[in-house]
Amino acid sequence: MYVEPSPTPPDDLDGAVAVFVLHRKRLFGIAYRVLGSAVEAEDVVQEVWLRWQKTDRSVVANPAGFLSSATTRLAINVAQSARVRRETYIGPWLPEPVDTSADPEVGAQRAEAVELALLLVLEKLTPVERAVYVLREAFDYAYAEIADMLELSVVNVRKIVSRARRHLLDERRESVDAAEHRRLLTAFVSAARTGDVASLEALLAPGVVSLSDGNGMRGCARVPVLGRARVARLSAYRHLWREAELELVDANGATGVLVRRDGRTLAFMTATASKYGIHQVLWVFTPSKIAGFLDSRSRLARSLDAVPDGV
């Protein structure tokens, strides 16, 4: 469990900044996992900073606990309103990818709940269930601490974690290691660029699904595409790959691909794979999410190191 590294600092602005910057990495990690959006997570962290400034910090015995609790509660509130907004989203909704080349764990003690596929599964839980799971599995908070943060009983927290684990176990497959994932993804992209549908099908697992996040953009599949033959044909779409430039990137702790043409990034894609092959292909075409990923390197750097806005 996380141990507070220093006593509560003096009740002044410099002290408030020092404490907040010390914990900001963790706060971003909590909010991002609950929300699946780096932009929304940054907004939550900024709101927590404003509240921390206005708080009588002389009576806060555990700054780390106070900040984590405030972040979690705010993230739950945002997630509840985001769920309503996403009901009007056109086509599949995917979490916003973030660049994790500098910090694969995005602020967690463990890398749990940062992969895009897992964040997508977490969306099927309620915001409170998602928050409880994240605090326990990614940040190793004790059940009693989580209960205190969210004003739940310890028994209820244990039940929520147990239900979430069972639900996620039903949804997830055992993944290949990072090297094999990169090999499969590279082979997939190579076959797709050349229109080699047969090679694509050979890389795909039975029951493979392709999800395209475009929010109604023309040319984006608005429903999940199922089956080897259909996913292979869709992935080999010539217009996407024509004169495209590709860049392998580290996104959410795994390899992803940026597809560019004429200096403009058209898409981000990644995949999940098991010993049976690629069983999920994830495409992000929505411009705001692509822009968010491109900005995530500098945004994450600010999140980890910078003094909060307005200081």
Image: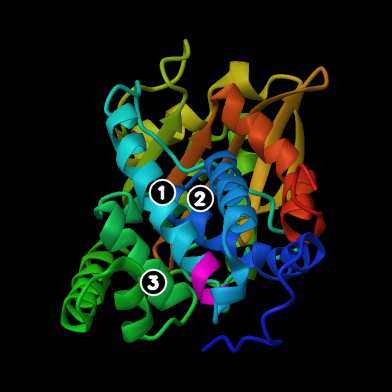
Horizontal arrangement in the rendering, residue 40 relative to residue 158 (left or right): right
Q: Residue at x 69, y 64 (%)?
A: 20
Q: From the viewer's perspective, is residue 212 above or below residue 296?
A: above
Q: Which residue is mark 2?
A: 271
Horizontal arrangement in the rendering, residue 294 relative to residue 226 (left or right): right
What amino acid is labelled 1 in the image?
A: Gln
What amino acid is labelled 2 in the image?
A: Ala
Q: Which mark is residue 280?
A: 1
- The CA distance from mark 2 to mark 1 is 5 Å
Q: Which mark is residue 110?
A: none
Residue 201 part of the magenta segment: no
Q: Picture coordinates of residue 170 (x, y %)?
A: 22, 66
Q: Which residue is mark 3?
A: 174
Residue 65 part of the magenta segment: yes
Crowding at mark 3 (Cα within 10 Å: few <14, some 14-19, many 20+): few
Horizontal arrangement in the rendering, residue 303 relative to residue 173 (left or right): right
Q: From the viewer's perspective, is residue 175 above or below residue 120?
A: below
Crowding at mark 1 (Cα within 10 Å: few <14, some 14-19, many 20+): many
The total number of labels drawn is 3
Name the quadrant containing residue 2: bottom right
Q: Which residue is farthest top?
A: 218
Label 3: element kind: loop
What amino acid is labelled 3 in the image?
A: Glu
The residue segment tinted magenta is 63-67
Decide which of tag 1 and tag 3 comes sooner along the chain. Answer: 3
Q: Picture coordinates of residue 106 (x, y %)?
A: 63, 63
